[in-house]
Amino acid sequence: METTTVTCTLHYPDGTPLGDGTTIEAQLSHLEKSDGFVVPVVVSAIPVDGIATLELFPNELGSESSYYTISIKVGKRTISTIGTVVVPNADCDLWEIVELDPYPVRNAGDIITAEQIEAIEAAAAGIVPTILRASGSIGGSRIVCNTGGVATYADSSDVGTAHNISGISSNAATTGGDVTVITEGPITESSWSWIPGQPIYVSTNGLLAQTSPASGYVRKIGFAQSATTIIVQTFQPIILGG
């Protein structure tokens, strides 16, 4: 899927750069397709020293006159809405593309099916992150359990973790820090290389895999929408015998 790197430089009114605890989120206004895949509706990034990068679909290549709405969140709370941006087919700075007019509607030539629309709308509607406290060092993009409000790694070899899985962490944290957990809907990580359309399983030590484990328990956490995006869903575990 085509993406454009949008660099975001963000500061509080007093000049302090945004950092730990904040997330910048981009939400797509209309469904689009790219290279046969439905474009992720929501993409987020965590700023470091006030700088974050969003890998966004170029609205210039779309057919639906789409745009993104950019907001800044602390946990689940939106503290600021920057406005709408229209992403060109070239890497750019966020502030160069704020409040531009959308590109005109064009003939898609590639129909988005009703099933795909239902799936992506349901995913977008279900994005209600859970905030947990890290039990220790918790990595981003890991499957975590909710143990009394504390995030611990799920592990397919430990049947005791089979039934209290919360979702996938969207940030890393140290002991006692906040872990934002995506419990349903899309989550994107540029380093992933999944096979689109195939399920994602719980593996060991919070890791994700597309191969089901041979012992312990089997539990799907969602499916790959593209090589770098997972749609998180809730499935029941299957406890393996022997």
Image (cartoon, grey):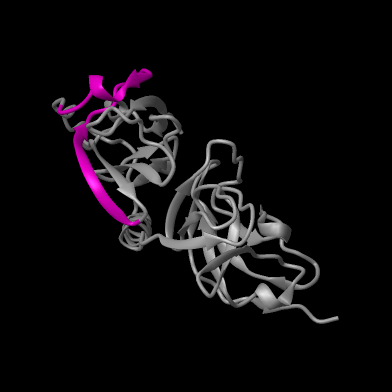
Question: Residue shown at 22%/43% (left/top)?
Answer: 80
Q: Nearer the viewer, residue 201 or 72?
A: 72
Which residue extends farthest front? Answer: 14
The answer to which image quadrant residue 124 occupies is bottom left
Question: Residue shown at 72%/76% (left/top)?
Answer: 159
State whether residue 92 is above or below residue 134.
Answer: above
Does 88 appear in magenta?
Answer: yes
State whether residue 117 is above or below residue 71.
Answer: below
| In the displayed structure image, the side of residue 207 where residue 122 appears, left or right | left
State whether residue 188 is above or below residue 115.
Answer: above
The answer to which image quadrant residue 86 occupies is top left
Q: Nearer the viewer, residue 84 or 178?
A: 178
Residue 83, given in percent of the width and then of the height, sits at: 18, 36
Q: Nearer the viewer, residue 235 or 142?
A: 142
The answer to which image quadrant residue 55 occupies is top left
Question: Residue shown at 80%/71% (left/top)?
Answer: 215
| In the displayed structure image, the side of residue 231 where residue 75 appears, left or right | left
Task: State which region is magenta.
Answer: 76-99
Residue 149, given in percent of the width and then of the height, sits at: 50, 70
